[in-house]
């Protein structure tokens, strides 16, 4: 029973990371209707930026983290301005835009390999994050608490942004009906830039958290993208509670599989879960989620 509780706890921590990345992606999809696979490159760029500034250059970790978040936002906005906006103006089909997004992800990962090499880049263990405490049967580390605290701050901040600010309300209006949003005075291009900025900064948060705990690799963005898409299908695209529930379910599933099965069964069970949801509840855990942020 103690092992079950510990594995579930580990799954919750992973699930929070998946949920953060998934909701940043969900926000972009529900507002722009672009399946933004290049979101994976945003995570890679932010993770490598943090590793380089903190580990290679020796910049203060808080400054490096803030800079990595900014770089993530810049990458997301750049993809919108350089790739998606010209394609929309050219009246490109959704399939062409999807192909362009995949191309950005592949090109970005290969660029990282050319610049930094393909070998994993670890960050030296820090005394500040090396401690842990025992709470009943649970072993809770400093990094676990950092993930929980960061997730709480980001999700509360996103909720306030979308319910209390004009920018956040414009995201919802554009996602619901772009033409009607324009009649209300909302500038679509500005809303698109804003949602790519916000969604990409959110994606950079798990990038930094993962870089602190494990070596960064060029393929980490694609790996997390797959988990995020599974979480969104399960939870419902466009819904913050859906992204959180989907991310947690994916994380806990991964964590508990090793209780009875070899670790290589983890992805099989994850995609089996996805298959079941697609067949039995294709709208996800939250109904009409794409119209409700």
Image (cartoon, rainbow, N blue to C red):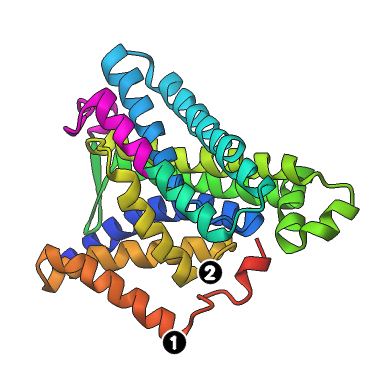
Q: Residue furthest left?
A: 262
Residue 147 against residue 61 in the figure, above or below: below
Label 2 crowd (10 A; few <14 / some 14-19 / many >=20): many
Q: Report the Cα–Cα distance between label 2 and label 1.
A: 14 Å
Locate residue 161, reporting x and y percent: 68, 46
- Of mark 2 and mark 1, the one earlier in the sequence is 2
Locate residue 111, reporting x and y percent: 32, 31
Q: Which quarter shows the C terminus?
A: bottom right
Q: Residue at x 29, y 77 (%)?
A: 272
Please report the bounds of the magenta region as a residue range: 106-130
Residue 93 marker: none
Locate residue 289, reporting x and y percent: 61, 69
Q: Residue at x 46, y 69 (%)?
A: 233
Provide the residue designation for mark 1.
280
Q: Which quarter shows the N terminus?
A: bottom left
Provide the residue designation for mark 2.
236
In-image side of 39 versus 47 (left or right)? right
> Looking at this view, is 128 or 287 the one in front?
287
> Looking at this view, is 171 or 209 the one in front?
171
> Looking at this view, is 202 or 94 the one in front?
94
């Amino acid at each position: 029973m103690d092992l079950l509780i510990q594995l579930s706890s580990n799954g919750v921590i992973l699930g929070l990371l998946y949920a953060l990345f998934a909701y940043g992606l969900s926000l972009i999809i529900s507002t722009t209707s672009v399946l933004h696979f290049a979101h994976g490159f945003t995570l890679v760029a932010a993770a490598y930026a943090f590793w380089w500034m903190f580990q290679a250059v020796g910049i203060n970790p808080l400054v490096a983290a803030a800079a990595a978040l900014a770089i993530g936002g810049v990458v997301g906005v750049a993809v919108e301005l350089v790739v998606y906006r010209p394609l929309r103006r050219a009246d490109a089909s959704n399939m062409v835009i999807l192909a362009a997004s995949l191309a950005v992800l592949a090109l970005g990962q290969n660029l990282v390999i050319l610049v930094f090499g393909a070998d994993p880049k670890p960050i030296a263990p820090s005394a500040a994050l090396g401690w842990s405490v025992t709470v009943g049967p649970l072993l809770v580390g400093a990094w676990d608490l950092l993930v929980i605290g960061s997730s709480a701050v980001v999700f509360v901040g996103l909720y306030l942004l979308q319910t209390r600010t004009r920018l956040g309300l414009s995201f919802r209006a554009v996602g619901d009906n772009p033409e009607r949003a324009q009649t209300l005075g909302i500038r679509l291009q500005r809303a698109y830039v804003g949602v790519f900025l916000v969604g990409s900064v959110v994606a950079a948060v798990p990038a930094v958290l993962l870089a602190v705990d494990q070596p960064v690799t060029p393929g980490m963005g694609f790996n997390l993208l797959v988990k995020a898409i599974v979480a969104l299908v399960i939870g419902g695209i466009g819904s913050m509670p859906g992204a959180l529930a989907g991310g947690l379910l994916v994380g806990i599933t991964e964590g508990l599989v090793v209780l009875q099965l070899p670790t290589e069964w983890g992805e099989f069970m994850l995609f089996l879960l996805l298959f079941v949801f697609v067949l039995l509840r294709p709208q996800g855990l939250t109904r009409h989620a794409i119209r409700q942020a």
